Amino acid sequence: MPCNSRRMRARERGDVLGRAEFLSLHQPQRNGGAARRPSNIKAHQHHEHAPQPPGEGVKERAEAPRWPEEDCMRLNPSLRGIAVSSLLAIDIHLSKRLGVCAHGSSSWGSVRSVVTLLALTGHGLTWIGGTLLCLTRSSTEAGQEVLINLLLALVLDILMVAGVQKLVKRRGPWEMTPGFLDCVAMDMYSFPGAHASRATMVSRFLLSHLVLAVPLRVLLVLWAFLVGLSRVLLGQNHVTDMACGFALGSLHYVLVETIWLPSSACQMLLSIGTLSWSPFH
């Protein structure tokens, strides 16, 4: 029985090897096949080195996957990038530490209403309303000239700051939602500090066109600084926002002094505003 089983297995292997698909394995190779092999290799190599149409290479390069920039690792960051990142980190940390009146539960939450009132003294609507009220009460051409130029300076400051804020779109350190008055004055973002810019411009304007005693001049400068600082204490501005606001306010003052409207132009604007312009009568 064991001999019969061995014979049957050998016969089965012989039948399998005798099939058509396995004949090339146990038969000697002919010269034709050996001759065809180099030609096939040459044809394959010729196909690989054949010039491709110009559109295919561009398409392959265009279809190559591109990793997003945030997933790319910068192994050699520049010294400038490291310095800027460090300064921004310090600015954010310091601004959060100074936001002691950001909420009612903050460390200085008990004086939050006082700091809010101080910030309100530098609001754009407060100064525009006060300037218009003084303009209606003024009876001298010199006073009207100063007030109209101050009004134009306030409008210019609001528009310039709102434009820069719209471009930068930097949020405050505590991500607070702007209030109603801030929305009306277009003070929607943090950079640059609108209150700091306005307070600086107004203080320099008043120091230049009003005759004030030395204590009042010192108090005016101190008020401008405290108005800018109040927004940092309320958690609505960074320290760099306040500093850039001071610089931008000084620039606005210089610009207003450059394009100062004379008394004749101011009287014409007043006549148009009060509908008493002579061509209409």
Image (spheres, rainbow, N blue to C red):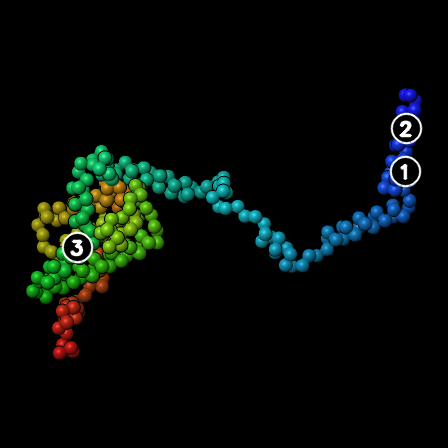
Q: Is residue 3 left or right of residue 175?
A: right
**Mark 1 element type:** loop
The answer to whether the residues at label 3 and label 1 have Cβ atoms under 8 Å apart is no
**Which numbered disc covers residue 8?**
2
Quarter occupied by the C terminus: bottom left
Return the residue nearer the eye: 67 or 215.
Answer: 67
Crowd class of label 1 (few under 14; some 14 to 19; many from 20; radius 10 Å): few
Q: CA distance from mark 3 to mark 2?
A: 111 Å
Q: Viewer-proximal residue, 22 or 250?
A: 22
Res 52 visible: yes
Q: Residue at x 22, y 56 (%)?
A: 253
Cα–Cα span, label 2 and label 1: 15 Å
**Mark linked to residue 18:** 1
Q: Amino acid at mark 3?
A: Trp
Where, by quadrant of the figure, is residue 205 drawn?
bottom left
Instruction: Measure the alpha-carbon separation of dots 3 and 1.
Output: 106 Å
Residue placed furthest toward the front:
1
User: Which mark sits nearer the N-terminus, 3 or 2?
Assistant: 2
Measuring 7% from the left and 64% from the top, which residue is drawn there? 139
Which residue is at 35% across, 51% downward? 168
Looking at the picture, which amino acid does disc 2 mark? Met
The residue tagged 3 is 127
Residue 262 appears left or right of 63: left
Place of residue 166 in the rendered image (x, y in percent of width and height, measured from the top left):
33, 54
Tell me if residue 212 comes above or below residue 152 in the rendering.
Answer: above
Which of labels 2 and 1 is toward the front? 2
Please name the amino acid that badge 1 sits on: Gly
